[in-house]
Amino acid sequence: MPIQNIKRVRPIEPAPDSGYEVAYGVHLDDGPEPQAVVEYAKGAGHHASEAHVRRALVPYLDEDVLPARLIVDRDGTIRAAD
């Protein structure tokens, strides 16, 4: 079943020593754990916002499963992490 909507997006701390400066958790339900994380590489933080996270997820909303991690590179390129 395709993902119908994003319940909420909230800023979270990136993992220490991860090389990411900003991260957001994406919740598809009311549970405490995010179903996906969008991380911004160092130097890409100027792209970071809740609205940007939602736009980054649009290509995946017709899928059955959201990628667990999306990475936003310095140039603004968005990719699913392996």
Image (cartoon, rainbow, N blue to C red):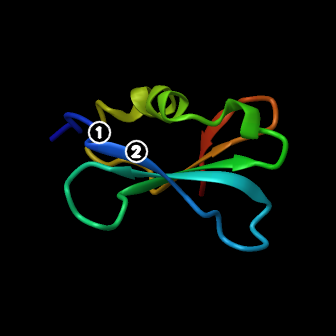
Q: Residue 3 location, x and y as percent?
A: 23, 38
Instruction: Tell me: 45 left or right of 25.
Output: right
Q: Which mark is residue 31?
A: none
Q: Which mark is residue 6?
A: 1
Q: Residue 42 location, x and y as percent?
A: 82, 49
The vertical placement of 4 against 68, above or below, is: above
Residue that numbered label 2 is attached to: 9
Instruction: Tell me: 68 left or right of 46.
Output: left
The vertical placement of 59 against 74, above or below, is: above
Residues 15 and 63: in front is 15
User: Residue 1's image quarter?
Assistant: top left
User: Residue 14's image quarter?
Assistant: bottom right
Crowding around mark 1 (Cα neighbors within 10 Å: few <14, some 14 to 19, many 20+) is some
Measuring 51% from the left and 31% from the top, which residue is drawn there? 56
The vertical placement of 1 against 27, above or below, is: above
Q: Tags 2 and 1 in contact by the CB under 8 Å rule?
A: yes
The C terminus sits in image quarter: bottom right
Mark 1 residue type? Ile
